[in-house]
Amino acid sequence: MPLKRDDTSAAGRRALQTELLVLLQDFEPDPPVLRLILRAQQQGGTNRQAIAAREFTFVEPMRERTPYAGVVAADQATARALRDVTAFVREHAR
């Protein structure tokens, strides 16, 4: 049996839209760095109107000039990003 969509149930709900803008292992500076930039936008109501938007930038130093060190730095930058985006959502959830 197909599911029936109830548009009225979306009233008051919120959504978080994220977009990865940059994920780059940059070996030019000394020490090399991982660059992570993402945009987050909170949307609410039945028409998904923008409530708040923010761009997050993280630069994580790499311990070595290797792709694997970039992966480790990406993990660290992602953990920071998750904490910061969580705080952003909580700040505007009122």
Image (tube, rainbow, N blue to C red):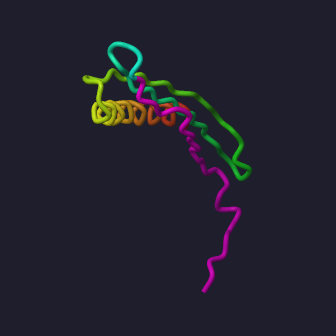
Quadrant of the rendered structure where residue 32 is?
top left
- Relative to 13, does residue 65 appear above or below in the rendering? above
Q: Position of residue 87 (x, y in %)?
A: 45, 31
The quarter of the rendered structure image containing the N terminus is bottom right
State the residue lying farthest toward the left.
Answer: 63
Quadrant of the rendered structure where residue 66 is?
top left
Query: For the point 57% across and 28% down, which residue is it?
Result: 55
- Relative to 66, does residue 9 appear above or below in the rendering? below
Let me know if residue 7 is in the magenta part: yes
Q: Where is residue 75 in the image (x, y as percent from the top left)?
A: 33, 36
Query: For the point 33% across and 31% down, which residue is it?
Result: 70
Q: Position of residue 92 (x, y in %)?
A: 56, 33
Count the marks: 0
Let me know if residue 45 is in the magenta part: no
Does residue 26 appear left or right of residue 8 in this picture? left
State the residue lying farthest toward the bottom.
Answer: 1
Is residue 53 or residue 55 the one in the foreground? 55
Query: For the point 53% across and 38% down, which residue is it?
Result: 20
Quadrant of the rendered structure where residue 73 is?
top left
Query: For the point 63% across and 82% down, which residue is it?
Result: 2
- Relative to 9, does residue 64 appear above or below in the rendering? above
Is residue 86 or residue 22 the one in the foreground? 22
Does residue 52 appear left or right of residue 49 in this picture? left
Q: Give the range drawn in magenta.
A: 1-26
